[in-house]
Image (spheres, rainbow, N blue to C red):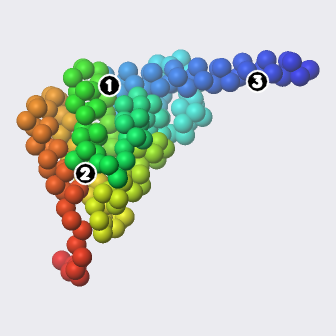
Amino acid sequence: MNCASIIVVSASTSTTTTSTRTALLAAAESLFLADGYDQVSVRAICAAAQANPAAVHYHFGSKDQLTVALLEERLAPLWADPLDRFDPACHRVADLVNTVVAPFVTIQGDPRGRLHLQLLSRFALSHPRAGWTQPWFRLERWSTLLVELVPGLSTEDARRRWSLAFALILAGFGGEHPLSAPSVDALSQFVVAGLGTPARTGPQTQS
């Protein structure tokens, strides 16, 4: 086999791999949104994608990691640009919370988007150790920003605050019905208050 043949075979293999991965994501998305994450098996995903029964494990490693890839691919672009431009030196905690909440408000107005939010909410809350790969799906990036916005706040406390904040946000937007504007305002204000509370400077006692 000459070099040209090797290049053609490699390109064909790469295209097939990409096509199978895309088909698996699309099949999983449709099944998850129709039947719910827990009711869908790996075998069903592979069958719907017309792929080998081992395809999910080959391309993603597990059903959980396929779900991570699906949610990151569908939702990460909605937050990435505004968050990448966020400058703690020029903004407040309220600005950061608004940046986080605004896409949720937009998504929940679309029936399919609302289903994505329900999947995100239920998966993230039930899989606290999911292997997220995109930076804005990981607490480290958020903790760094909050430490810069709240003087004296430790990284560990910032992580705890964000864990609680995201649990509340996901629970609110992951319901069956869209949140009303007053509910969104109340949720945002509550999250801002929790994230922005001044750091404790005195000795802390354990309960």
Give the quadrant of residue 121.
top left
| Residue behind mark 2 | 93
Badge 2: how crowded within 10 Å, few (<14), some, or many (20+)? Answer: many
**Who's the residue at 58% across and 33% down the image?**
59
Assign the C terminus to one quadrant of the image. bottom left
Instruction: Work out whether 205 lies above or below 123.
Output: below
Residue type for callout 3: Ser
Q: CA distance from mark 2 to mark 3?
A: 49 Å
- Left or right? Give the position of 148 relative to 190: right
Residue type for callout 2: Val
Residue type for callout 1: Leu
Between disc 1 and disc 3, the foreground one is: 3
Q: Is residue 40 visible in this depiction of the protein?
A: no
Q: Residue 10: which disc?
A: 3
| Residue behind mark 1 | 33
Q: Position of residue 195 (x, y in %)?
A: 23, 56
Q: Is residue 10 visible in this depiction of the protein?
A: yes
Sooner in the amino-acid sequence: mark 1 or mark 3: 3
Is mark 2 in CB contact (under 8 Å) with mark 3?
no
Sooner in the amino-acid sequence: mark 2 or mark 3: 3
Circle 3 — which element? helix
